[in-house]
Image (spheres, rainbow, N blue to C red):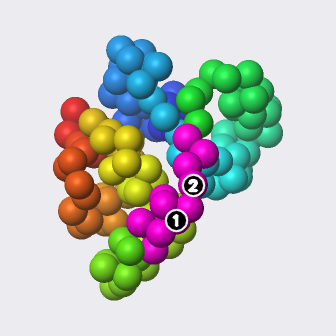
């Protein structure tokens, strides 16, 4: 999401092109929202963070709120890949991607996402674009 918003990001053009082809298919897992708000404000400024929050509140992005099953699956992944120390956010993103049978996960965190074998084997964008 940061690369989508930041024109200076190395992967901005590839991510923006992928988003513009199918914006309705992009789903944001709830767990990324606080971290996204913080990172966008820190890197891109409070005005960009405020605009993002307006877009989120206005339905500009589909948000997946999930449930207990996602938290359980996230914890299974944390246990199975203990050495990676995935944590809550990455675990929930992975669990939601599996449950929704996501075609891709947009991430530059290849250390964690590239090491975990997920059901459905979603691509990792921008790496696999």
Label 2 neighbour load within 10 Å: few <14, some 14-19, many 20+: few
Residue at (64% x, 55% y) in the render: 35
Total marks placed: 2
Residue placed most toward the observer, 16 or 78 = 78
Determine which quarter of the picture holds residue 126: top left
Residue 83 lies, in percent from the top left, at 34, 85
Tag of residue 71? 1
Q: Are marks 2 and 1 in contact (CB under 8 Å)?
A: yes
Residue at (79% x, 39% y) in the render: 46
Judged left or right of residue 87, residue 100 is left
- 25 to 98, vertically: above or below: above
Q: Quadrant of the C terminus?
A: top left
Judged left or right of residue 91, residue 113 is left
Residue 80 lies, in percent from the top left, at 31, 79
Residue 94 lies, in percent from the top left, at 39, 56
Secondary structure found at label 2: loop
The residue where tag 2 is placed is 67
Residue 30 lies, in percent from the top left, at 60, 48
Residue at (56% x, 61% y) in the render: 68
Magenta region includes residue 70: yes
Residue placed most toward the observer, 36 or 98 = 98
Residue at (25% x, 58% y) in the render: 118
Secondary structure found at label 1: helix
Determine which quarter of the picture holds residue 12: top left
Determine which quarter of the picture holds residue 23: top left
Residue placed most toward the observer, 78 or 111 = 78
Q: What is the span of residues highlighted in magenta in the rendered image?
A: 64-75
């Amino acid at each position: 999401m940061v690369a989508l918003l930041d024109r200076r990001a190395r992967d901005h053009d590839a991510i923006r092109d992928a988003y513009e082809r199918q914006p309705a298919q992009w789903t944001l897992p709830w767990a990324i929202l606080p971290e996204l708000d913080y990172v966008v404000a820190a890197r891109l400024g409070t005005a960009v963070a405020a605009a993002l929050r307006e877009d989120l509140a206005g339905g500009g992005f589909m948000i997946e709120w999930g449930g207990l099953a996602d938290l359980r699956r996230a914890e299974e992944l944390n246990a199975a890949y203990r050495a990676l120390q995935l944590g809550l956010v990455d675990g929930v993103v992975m669990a939601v991607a599996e449950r929704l049978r996501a075609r891709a996960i947009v991430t530059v965190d290849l250390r964690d996402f590239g090491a975990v074998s997920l059901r459905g084997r979603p691509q990792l964008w921008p790496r696999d674009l």
